[in-house]
């Protein structure tokens, strides 16, 4: 009897945990310093479907789609094509903040983005 009660509690806790899993989907905003030292405002729109991540990133230079996007728990990764360069991105998110590392021809840049407030 105790074993059945314990298993029931374990199942309920597991299902509740799944219901409150963090979701990366939505609009995120931040700024990154470019190779020349100027700040560039970025707007990401992420869409998560299972472990697949799609969406766009927009800056003053235009909008580009995310490619090869993946989500694994609180970790995510994607690529963006800017001109002739592919910029790889790896990140971790918690609540409404995400830290990204972008790897491009200039080297590596780390920056933070925040979930945009609902309008």
Image (spheres, grey):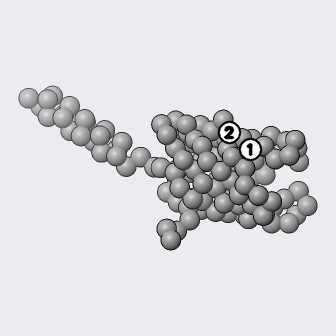
Q: Nearer the viewer, residue 31 or 7?
A: 31
User: Which labelled disc corresponds to residue 80?
Assistant: 1
Secondary structure category for the residue under label 1: strand
Question: For the view shown, which residue lies furthest in the left direction?
Answer: 1
Q: Residue at (15%, 28%) from the top-left corner?
A: 3
Apparent side of residue 100 relative to residue 22 in the rendered image (left or right): right
Apparent side of residue 95 relative to residue 16 in the rendered image (left or right): right
Q: Position of residue 102 (x, y in %)?
A: 75, 47
Whether residue 12 appears in this view of the structure is: yes
Q: Nearer the viewer, residue 11 or 47?
A: 47
Reply above or below: 53 against 29. above
Q: Residue at (72%, 55%) from the top-left corner?
A: 63
Q: Residue at (80%, 40%) from the top-left corner?
A: 86
Residue indicated by mark 2: 67
Reply above or below: 22 against 33. above
Whether residue 98 appears in this view of the structure is: no
Distance of label 1 from label 2 (alpha carbons)? 6 Å
Q: Residue at (60%, 54%) from the top-left corner?
A: 45
Apparent side of residue 55 relative to residue 36 in the rendered image (left or right): left
Secondary structure category for the residue under label 2: strand
CB under 8 Å between discs 1 and 2: yes
Q: Rate crowding at label 1 as few (under 14), some (14 to 19) or many (20 or more) other CA atoms within 10 Å.
A: many
Apparent side of residue 68 relative to residue 2 in the rendered image (left or right): right
């Amino acid at each position: 009897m105790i074993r059945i009660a314990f298993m029931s509690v374990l199942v309920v806790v597991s299902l509740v945990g799944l219901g409150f899993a963090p979701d990366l989907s939505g609009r995120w905003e931040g700024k990154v310093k470019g190779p020349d030292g100027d700040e560039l405002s970025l707007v990401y729109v992420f869409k998560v479907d299972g472990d697949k991540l799609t969406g766009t990133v927009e800056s003053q230079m235009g909008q580009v789609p995310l490619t090869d996007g993946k989500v694994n728990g609180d970790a995510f990764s994607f690529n963006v094509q800017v001109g002739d360069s592919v910029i790889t991105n790896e990140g971790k998110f918690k609540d409404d903040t995400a830290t990204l590392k972008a790897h491009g021809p200039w080297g590596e840049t780390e920056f933070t983005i925040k979930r945009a407030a609902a309008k």
